Structure formats: structure tokens, C-alpha cells
Image: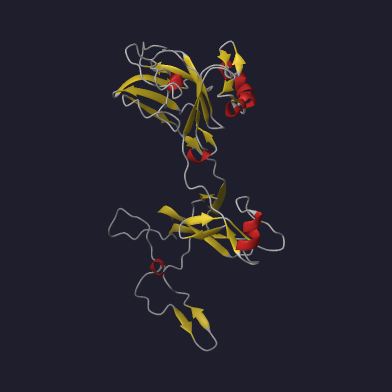
């Protein structure tokens, strides 16, 4: 992978292995590139939440509902959490009933959607007429508001947290006095709002429902590998410093050097910073240091990193300190 500016892109080099991208035809590979040239690809730069509305019946305009059928085994797998997941049950057959699927790309949530975090809200001219939440944590989207509204307490669909899909099957009317053209395949017929019409103004819906607005909130979960390291400073250790402020000032040259010698003075006095409540009394001397950084070395004693503490840690000779460090990979 190469990075030009801030945009990464994949590449392969034309060579004897004849490796290339699927988007490059054989004629393009032979005619447009010389051996040694870079064949560049591209990564998708956009991601969208898409929605599909399925009409009743096994066929979808003469074709099988391939996208819906692809979720059959996954839905049945989660049926131990709730019978509403079952592809075909007493709650309905998802192949033949009207329903809506919402596809959330993984780039928007990471590894999985956080349980209980997904909510769906339907507003009519700015007023909330219905809301869905997974209040049980088992993937059932239950209408929780407004209290006393049509369908209050009913299950309107399920959410596949790991796969990023929402299946809405609730077909009851959410409002008694409002209708609109919610079915994109019947542009001349008006219907009352229901959960199978949620996000009608999405990628495949007509932009002719100006009174309705939709909000879907969720949180993502991303697992980040972390290395935990412990640095210990036991009693009597790490109580000397080479910092010039460690010794008293005004002591002149602290070392002797020449052509054949380098020797530090043995009578250099260390600055006493032990606290006392009395101005005229000299406290007993104790070596005290402040730890502000921790150096990290590899097995060959090479410095590979430095960790800084938020505030310097006071280290007395009788103290035993352990500093915990975490590194996100």
C-alpha cells in the first residue's frame, strides 16, 4: 500500500507473476503497462447506510429476494435470543411479508454495534410519534414511546449487532390522521406511517414525504490490542538523580578531568528537600527524587520509547512504587 498525501491506495508491480487487480482487463494489462510499472488501485472513500423495502410475496419483481435470503441462516442462528429472529415463525414469514432492511456498513461501527445502543425515532413535523429501543438487550426492537401510542410495547423488528443489519417488520399504523406515499413501488397510493416505512426517504425511496423525518442512533465497539507494562521502583531504588538540580548550587566544579582521568568529587552535597514545619531547624537528610519519565528498553538494551507521567511522582527511600503503562497497538 502506498500513501500519497493523505489518500492510501493499493498497488502491484507488473512482473512475471502476471498479478493484477480484477478491475484491470487482460488487454489493459498487456497494452497499458510495461514490466516494472506500478498498477494502482483505490480504496472506497465513502460509506452509506442503505435501506431496502420488500413487498409481500416470495418474488421481488420476478426475482428472488437474494439479499433477504442471504440473511436467513444468520437470523435463524440468533433465534435462541428471541423467536422474532426466526425467518419463518408464528410472527410471520420474512420471505413473504412486507418488511424493511437497513444495512449499516462496518466502517461506521467497527467490530460490532454496542448492544442496547441502537434507537430509531420517527418525527412528524418535528414531533416524536414513535421510538424503538432494545430495552431487553436481546436484539428485539420494542416501541417504547410515546407512552400510549399505537403499537406501544410491541416488537417492530430485530437488529443484527455483529452484522450491521436492522430488520423492521412492524406494520401497524403509527398515526391515525396522517398518510403519505411511503411505498416507493406504488407512487400513487398513500399509506399511514408504520415501521416498515421507516427511512422511506433513503437511497431507494421517493423524496416526497417532507412531513416525516427519521433518526437512527447507535454506538460502535472497536477492540484495540493493548500491551500492558509495569515499571517498579522498590525501596531504596531510583533515589539518585543526575539532574543538576539534585545537588546544592554554588559548590564549584563537581568533577576533575584531564588527559588520563575523569573523577567526580566525593564531597558534593545533595540538596535536602525534606519538608519541615520549622524555619530554623534543619530536617534529617533523606534522598528524595521525582519520577517524571519512564524509559522503555528492548531485550538488547536499546531505548524504544519513553512514557511520561501526568504529574511527577515523589519517591522517598522507603517507598515502593509500581507504574502501569498501556500501549495501544
Q: Is residue 116 visible?
A: yes
In the foreground, 323 or 316: 323
Q: Position of residue 309 (x, y in %)?
A: 44, 53
Residue at the image position 43 percent from the left and 77 percent from the top: 254
Taking the spot 47% from the left edge, 16% from the top edge, the residue there is 170
Q: Nearer the viewer, residue 161 or 12?
A: 12
Q: Residue at x 56, y 32 (%)?
A: 163
Rendered position, 173 above or below 133: above
Q: Nearer the viewer, residue 128 or 321?
A: 128
Colour pattern of the rendering: secondary structure
Examine the rendered structure and indicate whether residue 269 appears above or below residue 276: below
Q: Position of residue 160 (x, y in %)?
A: 55, 28
Residue furthest to the right: 16
Q: Position of residue 33 (x, y in %)?
A: 61, 63
Q: Quadrant of residue 279?
A: bottom left
**How many numbered badges does the structure rendering display?**
0
Amino acid at each position: 500500500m502506498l500513501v500519497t498525501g493523505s489518500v492510501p491506495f493499493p498497488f502491484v508491480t507488473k512482473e512475471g507473476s502476471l498479478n493484477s487487480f480484477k478491475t484491470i482487463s487482460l488487454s489493459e494489462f498487456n497494452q497499458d503497462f510495461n514490466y516494472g510499472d506500478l498498477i494502482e488501485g483505490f480504496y472506497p472513500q465513502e460509506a452509506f447506510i442503505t435501506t431496502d423495502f420488500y413487498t409481500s410475496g416470495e418474488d421481488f419483481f420476478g426475482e428472488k429476494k437474494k439479499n433477504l435470503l442471504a440473511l436467513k441462516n444468520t437470523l435463524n442462528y440468533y433465534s435462541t435470543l428471541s423467536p422474532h429472529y426466526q425467518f419463518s415463525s408464528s410472527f410471520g414469514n420474512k420471505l413473504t411479508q412486507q418488511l424493511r432492511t437497513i444495512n449499516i456498513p462496518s466502517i461506521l461501527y467497527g467490530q460490532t454495534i454496542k448492544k442496547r445502543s441502537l434507537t430509531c425515532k420517527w418525527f412528524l413535523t418535528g414531533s416524536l410519534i414513535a421510538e424503538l429501543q432494545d430495552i431487553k438487550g436481546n436484539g428485539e426492537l420494542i416501541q417504547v414511546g410515546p407512552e400510549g401510542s399505537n403499537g406501544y410495547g410491541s416488537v417492530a423488528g430485530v437488529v443484527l449487532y455483529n452484522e450491521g443489519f436492522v430488520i423492521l417488520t412492524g406494520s401497524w399504523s403509527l398515526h391515525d390522521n396522517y398518510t403519505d406515499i411511503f411505498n416507493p413501488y406504488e407512487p400513487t397510493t398513500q399509506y399511514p406511517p408504520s415501521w416498515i416505512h421507516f427511512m422511506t426517504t433513503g437511497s431507494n425511496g421517493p423524496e416526497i414525504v417532507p412531513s416525516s423525518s427519521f433518526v437512527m442512533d447507535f454506538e460502535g465497539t472497536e477492540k484495540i490490542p493493548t500491551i500492558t507494562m509495569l515499571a517498579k521502583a522498590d525501596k531504596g531504588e531510583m533515589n539518585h538523580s543526575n539532574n543538576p538540580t539534585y545537588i546544592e548550587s554554588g559548590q564549584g566544579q563537581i568533577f576533575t578531568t584531564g588527559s588520563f582521568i575523569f573523577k567526580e568529587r566525593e564531597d558534593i552535597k545533595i540538596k535536602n528537600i525534606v519538608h519541615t514545619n520549622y524555619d530554623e531547624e534543619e530536617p534529617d537528610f533523606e534522598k528524595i527524587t521525582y519520577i517524571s519519565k519512564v524509559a522503555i528498553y528492548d531485550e538488547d538494551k536499546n531505548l524504544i520509547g519513553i512514557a511520561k507521567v501526568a504529574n511527577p511522582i515523589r519517591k522517598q527511600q522507603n517507598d515502593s512504587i509500581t507504574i502501569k503503562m498501556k500501549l495501544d497497538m
